[in-house]
Amino acid sequence: MGLDIGSHSIKIVALERGTHHSYRLVHARCREIYIGAEAYDPEGPKKATVVPLLIEMFYEMGLVPKRIRHLGSAVGGLNIAAKEIRSLQLSEDEMASAMLLEARKHLPLDGTESIVDHQILGDDPKEPDKVRVLLAATTKRTFETHLDILREIELAPGVVDIEPLAVLNSYVSSMDLPDEGVLVFLNVGCRKTTLSVLGRKDLFFTRDLPIGGYHFTQDIMRDLSMEYRDAENLKTSRGLRPDVKRADESAAAFTVTEKSALEKLGEEVSRSLRYYVKETGQGLFVKFVLTGGTAGSKDLQTFLSEKFNLSVEAYNPLAQFDGGTTHDNNPWQFAAAAGLALRAQAV
């Protein structure tokens, strides 16, 4: 089972091992955390809100949490970091110490110590005396808060990953990376969009962009004088740029036009890719791969394609599983949960 507790919704993917290394999709469930007139909380959901929803979801699936033997879950939010480091060959203890110091450069301070893991990816092809190291980190407070939710419903913690890596694990488990150039992944969440650059030979890069689904909803709320729930429903049914007249047309003439969330996102993506080219010398971006709740938006896909002159793919992580192609309820939002389930099965 893969469990992805996001800032806006909870996603669960349950798999059953089949023959010849295949998997059958048993469950793919998503539950919005904020329903009715309740407005989205930019600070993230509280345990008292998440736990009852998790209990309901397990009940609906007919599963008993304490009987789950292979669980993969993810730590998300703002206090996480994933980065590829070029390092000299070091002993295990020296490498762990070096990665801890590196993690502290990238994690926001919350008063607790850093929790760090790393994996040697192989020799550095450009500098023979160095190795490529993948760093993953979070803070102790974030990690313990996550475990506390799992224990509350008697889920035994298994693999605990960080969300950006879970998304990429889902993709590389079923899709090939290009022989030349890199892919640009945009995991469009509610609070933020995580941009990741990944290729066979080039430096892995990831960065959080401060624009997400909630900011698209805010645009509609502002432009059409709507409440949160009405704007969220309109975004889902009519897109990020709904052709609807605002309630107070007279006020529109006196409103200073500001950049939309889409335009701001485009600027952040452009800035990040320029930085990547400057740092690595790699400028061959093959295509965008979109995941997250807004990945299926035609408005977003068209905007990115026109701005960057690249093809755009909304990645369906469930299609790799037996029975997964029939799931048509926004499948791209399950990328992290699918990656977590695959990692849990392997342990």
Image (cartoon, rainbow, N blue to C red):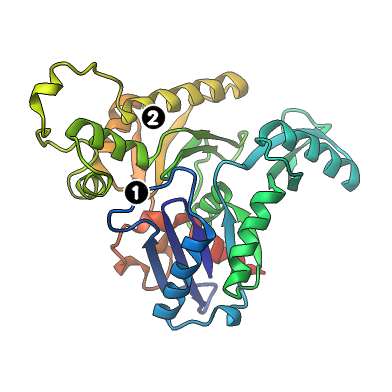
Q: Residue 96, image x and y in percent?
A: 83, 44
* Residue that appears at 20% across and 40% down: 226
For marks 1 and 2 on the same chain, the one whose residue lies earlier in the sequence? 1
* Residue that appears at 38% across and 54% down: 332
Q: Residue 232, image x and y in percent?
A: 26, 47
* Residue that appears at 60% across and 67% down: 150
Question: What residue did someone put label 2 on?
Answer: 265
Residues under labels 1 and 2: Cα distance? 23 Å
**Camera-side residue: 141 or 321?**
141
Say which quadrant the C terminus sits in: bottom right
- Does residue 305 sit above or below 43 in this rendering? above
Tag shown at residue 159: none
When asked about the image quadrant of residue 203, the answer is: top right
**Which amino acid, mark 2?**
Leu
From the viewer's perspective, is 258 left or right of 157? Answer: left
From the viewer's perspective, is 134 left or right of 21? Answer: right
- Does residue 67 sit above or below 103 in this rendering? below
Q: Residue 305, image x and y in percent?
A: 31, 32
Q: Residue 92, image x and y in percent?
A: 88, 47
